[in-house]
């Protein structure tokens, strides 16, 4: 039987792998998207550093660090969703941010 603790650990791993994949393997897509939205390179780099840092924080044994990490990801994903809505992106372009927002918020709520 899968407990809530195991489920949350799996979500933490999924979130980390997804962020690392997007910000390494799919980095060209990230650069293109930020350019299309008129966002500066320095902002893209700060977002990438924050996302990677926050996902690593999810794996801490200290609850407050996990709260900071999951809360940080939730805020970044909220910003991503709002940016996509403002730019009138099709849903398929921001379903990943909706999913990551849901995962990180679930982790946050179950860690507090």
Image (cartoon, rainbow, N blue to C red):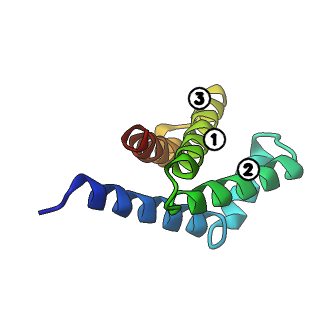
Count of residue discs: 3
Mark 1 lies on residue: 76
Tag 2–tag 1 contact (CB < 8 Å): yes
| Quadrant in which residue 83 is drawn | top right
| x and y percentages locating residue 24 in the rendered image | 66, 71
What residue is at 59 percent from the left and 29 percent from the top?
85
Number of residues whose C-alpha sits closer than 10 Å to that of mark 3, classed few (under 14), some (14–19) or many (20 or more): few
| x and y percentages locating residue 31 in the rendered image | 76, 58
53 sits to left or right of 92 = right
Number of residues whose C-alpha sits closer than 10 Å to that of mark 1, classed few (under 14), some (14–19) or many (20 or more): some
Mark 2 lies on residue: 47
Looking at the image, tell me whether mark 2 or mark 3 is earlier in sequence order: 2
| x and y percentages locating residue 51 in the rendered image | 65, 54
What residue is at 70 percent from the left and 50 percent from the top?
33
What residue is at 59 percent from the left and 45 percent from the top?
68
Q: Nearer the viewer, mark 2 or mark 3?
A: 2
Tag 2–tag 3 contact (CB < 8 Å): no
Q: CA distance from mark 2 to mark 1?
A: 8 Å
7 sits to left or right of 73 = left
Considering the image in quadrants, where does the C terminus appear? Answer: top left
Tag 1's secondary structure? helix
Mark 3 lies on residue: 85
Tag 1–tag 3 contact (CB < 8 Å): no
Q: CA distance from mark 1 to mark 3?
A: 14 Å
């Amino acid at each position: 039987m899968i407990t809530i603790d195991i489920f949350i650990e799996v979500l933490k791993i999924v979130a980390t792998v997804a962020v690392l994949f997007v910000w390494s393997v799919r980095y060209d897509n990230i650069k293109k998207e930020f350019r299309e939205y008129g966002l500066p390179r320095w902002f893209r780099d700060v977002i990438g550093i924050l996302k990677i840092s926050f996902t690593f924080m999810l794996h801490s044994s200290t609850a407050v660090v996990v709260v900071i990490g999951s809360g940080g990801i939730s805020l970044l994903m909220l910003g991503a969703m709002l940016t996509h809505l403002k730019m009138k992106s099709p849903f398929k372009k921001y379903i990943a941010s909706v999913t990551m927002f849901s995962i990180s918020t679930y982790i946050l709520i179950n860690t507090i």
